[in-house]
Image: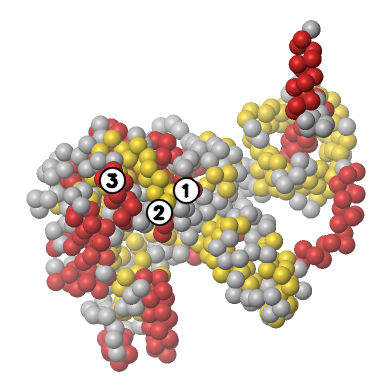
Amino acid sequence: MELEIKINQRLSKVKLISRNNNQIRVKVDDRIYDVDLCKVEESEYSVIYNGQSHNIEVIEGETSKRYIANTYFKSFDIEIVDAESRYQQNRNKGALDQTANTISTPMPGKVVRIPVVVNQKVSAGETVVVVSAMKMESEYKVSRDAVIKKVMVKEGDTVKSHQTLVIIE
Amino acid sequence: MIQKILIANRGEIAVRIMRSCREMGIRSVAVYSEADRASMHVRYADEAYHIGPSPSSESYLKMEKIIAVAKESHADAIHPGYGFLSENAEFAKLCGKEGIIFIGPTPHAMSTMGDKITARQTMINAGVPVVPGTRKKIIKPEDAKKVVDEIGLPVIVKASAGGGGKGMRLVEKESQLMDAIKAAKSEALTAFGDDSVYIEKYISSPHHIEFQILADKFGNVIHLCERECSVQRRHQKVVEETPSPIMTPELREEMGKTACAAAKTVNYDGVGTIEFLVDDKLNYYFLEMNTRLQVEHPITERVVGIDLVKEQIRVANGEPLHYKQEDIRQMGHAIECRIYAEDPDQNFMPSPGLVRHISEPRGLGVRTDGYVYAGYEIPIYYDPMISKLIVWARTREGAIARMKRALYEYKISGVKTSIKFLESIMKHPNFEAGNYNTHFIDDHFTALFKETQPCDVECEDLAVVTAFVDYLDKLENLTNISPPMQNGSYWKKYGRIKNVARI
């Protein structure tokens, strides 16, 4: 079994060479790893490599092919790149610019204020939506001069993380 | 005698109060908002009542509703915890009127200490040193100028009703003074509904040291030594320890006496905290009094061996103090770290959400006061603090080593936490040397965020391998599971089973 896996920006070829219960031999690009890998809890793995004990957590992301992996010191975005996701990526290429036109929040919260209306001209750095979570208000600003095309939420709405709040043009 | 207490709070502090109730054989009543139905304090309590929608203004701050629940459940007393209604003199009055014991000081003590200008004046009258500055609120701009000429720049303009760093402005040049007053006034008006401001000299590189007070209704007041709270970020405490690394036995005795005197001026009873600013030359000034249980009270409990919540309940019961000043001994060293659901890598952005897995540190000398469990969704409506980690050891060095160990063991997944950031504070040479003041985090910001152990290719590869294996196992499990109902009709399935069953 061979797959391409992306960790942050790096893309690697990963190949399973052999597997005997916990004893796993894997090739990552040209490096061979003999690891003893054991799932100890939901999303939590104990990995022994060269006698060193590591705890690595892999949490499934938005799709089954995306993970957030946490080692003791760092956190990574990991994506399994197979034929299907490559196809999806190619298809979505044209839509990439679309994301630059949306304002979204990285955390769940509640919309406190929307100081803009549709068709309003805004200049770079202007606040278009204020979201509050855990007693802290965060202002979301536009990064360039733009026109407000659509406001997807209203004041008082509870929003999920990465939900689109405002679309600009 | 108090037999049942309603806890008008949520989160870790509600659970912490209920623990003491349970040890004393007192029944506990929880109140909860919509978002808190599955919260730990509801599960831990003997009784629980819904009091309203999720925003705290519609639930935990609704005085009449909480009083109504107290009456319905026949609670003798209400413990307000910290935050919410804990320093609200109106609420304490209302409890008194309804014949319910409010576990805290009198409304008079609360309102005197709650208004900073009045508190300053009261302290000056009692001979307690305060930071040089105005005695009254600033009305005319000329008054402000006169004060600045007297005490010298830099100064701070502060809101009388203020707290948490709101309504505060630093003035370094005289030209900034008027703008600063205007800005502080408008901020104070929106945040507290009161635009009174006053001016205080700015103490550069101060330590924030506070004294724990314990008093009964018979005029007995003792102090339970100090807490050093100088590690702060945006005026919020992050790490606290006791004893303070800069404290001397003589200074402790003197400040302790001053703190007791300050509490006596308002006939204080119950537990309270006198906060002081201490400069490099060990001059100290009264800052404010907190008329409630503090977040960081466990470190005091640990070194003096007294359960502060139990003492609050005893005092509220009308019992005299069980301790004299000479009974109080500080034994060893305690440190507390506050664990927040915040992402230190993204400017401490709040990180509410589902906790997938949590494993708390254990072992000798470790206490965790938390309320979060695996599968719990941290709501967006309240404070981001999820837990307090308190360690104790005989020496400060031992306590720091133990805190590092405990932070290493602490695992919370699903939400981002400040654990890594706390670790780098513990490892910082200035913290280890006890050489820090309230500017510590700002002064060492880059050093605190430097990666202590960078992840090399091998460490990245191990993460890749783990995700790879997890994905392979997931694929295998998928192919083993029979496909879900194709046409989705359970009637057809039922019919088929029925037909077969007949044979």
Mark before the other along the chain sequence, 3 or 2? 2
Q: Chain of mark 3?
A: B
Quadrant housing the C terminus of chain A: bottom right
Marks 2 and 1 close (CB-CB < 8 Å): yes
Badge 1 amino acid: Glu
Taking the image as shown, residue B348 lies to the left or right of residue B305, namely right
Q: Which residue is mark 2?
A: B59
Query: x, y (%) of residue B299?
Result: 33, 45
Q: Which quadrant is home to the N terminus of chain A?
A: top right
Q: Which mark is residue B70?
A: 3
Its colouring scheme is: secondary structure
* Callout 1: chain: B
Residue B55 appears in the rendering: yes
Q: Nearer the viewer, residue B373 or B396?
A: B373
Residue that appears at 18% across and 62% down = B108
Look at the numbered disc 1 and give the secondary structure of its residue. helix
Q: Earlier in the sequence, mark 2 or mark 1?
A: 1
User: According to the image, label 1 marks what residue?
Assistant: B34
Residue B395 visible from this viewpoint: no
Q: Which subunit holds the residue at mark 2?
A: B
The answer for how far apart the CA atoms under marks 2 and 1 are is 9 Å
Q: Which mark, residue B145? A: none
Precedes in sequence: disc 1 or disc 3: 1
- Determine whether label 3 and label 2 are within 8 Å by CB: no
Query: Mark 1, residues whose alpha carbon is within 10 Å: few (<14), some, or many (≥20)?
Result: few
Q: Disc 3 and disc 2: Cα gap in Å? A: 14 Å
